[in-house]
């Protein structure tokens, strides 16, 4: 049996630890309620039992990965040229200051 310091088994210490854990639990429950209310207001995906946290599990609160990806933005050759010229101009001014 491992040696446990006497202060760890002290009832006062254990009561304080329990009180702190209960406060943490209360804060977490408040945060869960807040997130649930946000899901309800925004018409989120928590409409089915599978996606909701009604049964008490937090799996319903985890966001599903995005299925849609944004299209890649494409610059025209003229825009690339303008950007390159502006960058060259900035670097030239930077080098002059040195």
Image (cartoon, grey):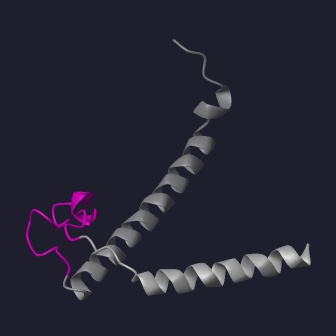
Residue occupying the point 10% across, 62% down: 50
Q: Quadrant of the C terminus?
A: bottom right
Question: Measured along the vertical axis of the image, is residue 62 above or below residue 46?
Answer: above
Work out whether residue 78 or residue 61 is closer to the camera in this orientation and state it.
Answer: 78
* Left or right: 71 in relation to 16: left
Q: In this view, which residue lies farthest toward the right?
A: 98
Work out whether residue 9 or residue 78 is closer to the camera in this orientation and state it.
Answer: 78
Work out whether residue 51 or residue 7 is closer to the camera in this orientation and state it.
Answer: 51
Q: Position of residue 89 (x, y in %)?
A: 71, 83
Residue occupying the point 22% across, 83% down: 40
* Left or right: 43 in relation to 71: left
Q: Which residues are magenta?
A: 44-68
* Left or right: 86 in relation to 33: right
Prevailing secondary structure of the magenta residues:
loop
Name which quarter of the figure residue 49 lies in.
Answer: bottom left
Residue occupying the point 81% across, 81% down: 93
Q: Position of residue 11 (x, y in %)?
A: 58, 39
Question: Measured along the vertical axis of the image, is residue 5 above or below residue 57?
Answer: above
Residue occupying the point 49% across, 53% down: 21
The answer to if 17 sits in the magenta stretch is no
Question: Measured along the vertical axis of the image, is residue 65 above or below residue 88?
Answer: above
């Amino acid at each position: 049996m491992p040696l446990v310091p006497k202060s760890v088994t002290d009832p006062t210490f254990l009561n304080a630890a329990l009180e702190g854990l209960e406060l943490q639990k209360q804060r977490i429950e408040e945060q869960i309620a807040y997130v649930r209310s946000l899901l309800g207001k925004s018409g989120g995906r928590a409409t089915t039992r599978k996606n909701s946290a009604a049964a008490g599990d937090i799996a319903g609160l985890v966001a599903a990965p995005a299925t849609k990806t944004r299209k890649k933005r494409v610059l025209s050759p003229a825009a690339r040229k303008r950007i390159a010229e502006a960058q060259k101009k900035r670097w030239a001014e930077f080098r002059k200051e040195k």
